[in-house]
Image (tube, rainbow, N blue to C red):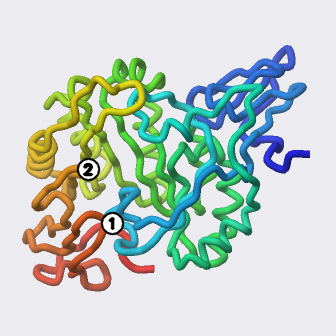
Amino acid sequence: MDPCVREAGFWEPSEGGDVQCFLCSHRCRIKPGKRGICRVRENREGKLYTLVYGRVAATGLDPVEKKPLYHFLPGSLTFSLATVGCNLDCSHCQNYSLSQAPGPPAKMPGSYVDPRGIVSEAMASGASSISYTYSEPTIFMEYALDIMEMAHEEGLKNIFVTNGFMTPEAVKALDGLLDAANVDLKGMTEDFYRKVCHAKLEPVLESIRNLKKIGVWVEVTTLVIPGYNDSEEELDKIAGFIKSVDPEMPWHVTGFHPTYKMMDVEPTKSDILEKTRTKALLSGLSYVYTGNRQSAQGANTFCPGCKALLISRQGFCINDFHIDRPNKCPSCGREIAGVFWR
């Protein structure tokens, strides 16, 4: 028996031996012998099985800033893991070798590691948290939930780096277990999500709201792609949406590099990222960062009140840290949003 193949959660039987999956917002109705869009959940004789429980395809020890999370335990290390598979097929995917799981009869990549083994590795590495990342963690939710519970028992935090295309039922299952998330808000039009990601926008917006409601620390990332989602109007709409949820929610605007199915698209110019950051700060967002490009100030954290420099960064490294307990600017006393202490 393959230990990675287990009956899944988040499904119900349907007519004719079909199953209805409600883990992600595709809500696939899957016929017997077939797999969902993620290609890692399969209907076997009227029951839904996950094919990637514990089937670890990648691990790593990363600075938490690499996720990117700038307001969640900055300067700490996070133990990262992934299986193969994703519920999206983004034309600009930077981890397509992991995200696009092979269909049958190809062997599914990865080797079995039980949840306790992951927690033990994370503890031994000196990490403060476990990140479910690299591919889309929603698709290995059953495995992630088991790890999360054990991680909390050992004092480790849990982080999702996610496209956000999950159902409210999935978010509910994360309540009390997930501590932080970086959500990719890839664009702000249904047209972009349909053509580039083969998905829909609204469920992602709903997930950001729902994660915030259950007390998860949320940061948002947008990869700015020339000619696709780089108009001022669209970027302004993203800033406006984040502000409507919480103006203290950090936004990372990052630069695109040609990859996967977008090798013919030019890299993002740094001035677009800087302009977006400036406009978003003026519009009322408290924390906006630029990524994947050299920037004099775009990686630093400033007090939204007095503009004092609170955290100075170079790449993923922190040079200086000036936030007083509990989360106060030492210059003016303004509260600084985030989780800065274990």
Residue 170's x, y, as percent? 61, 44
Give the CA distance from mark 2 to mark 1: 18 Å
Q: Is residue 109 left or right of residue 232?
A: right
- Residue 333 in the image, given as x and y percentages of width and height: 17, 80
Which corner quadrant holds the C terminus? bottom left
Counting other residues with Cα less than 10 Å from the Cα at mark 2, is it few (<14), some (14-19), or many (20 or more)?
some
Identified at 20% across, 31% down, the residue is 230
Residue at the image point whose x is 72% and y is 33% from the top = 41
Q: Residue at x 67, y 66 (%)?
A: 118
* Residue sticking out furthest to the top: 16
Q: Whole-percent x and y of residue 201?
A: 40, 29
- Locate the N terminus by quadrant: top right
In this rendered view, identify the residue nearer to me: 305 or 222: 222
What is the secondary structure assignment of the residue under circle 1? Answer: loop
| Image position of 194 (left or right of 251) | right
Q: Which mark is residue 48?
A: none
Q: Quadrant of residue 17?
A: top right
Left or right, 333 with reference to 128: left
User: Mark 1: which amino acid?
Assistant: His
Q: What amino acid is at disc 2?
A: Asn
Q: Is residue 260 positioned above or below 135 on the image? A: above
Q: Which residue is mark 2?
A: 292
- Which is in the foreground here, disc 2 or disc 1? 2
Q: Which residue is mark 1?
A: 71
Look at the picture and state if 247 lies above or below 202. Answer: below
- Whether label 2 touches label 1, CB < 8 Å: no
Quarter location, residue 35 = top right
Q: Where is 277 relative to 48, above or below?
A: below
Residue that appears at 25% across and 51% down: 291
Q: Residues within 10 Å of mark 1 (few under 14, many from 20)?
A: many
Please, what secondary structure does the residue beneath circle 2 have? Answer: loop
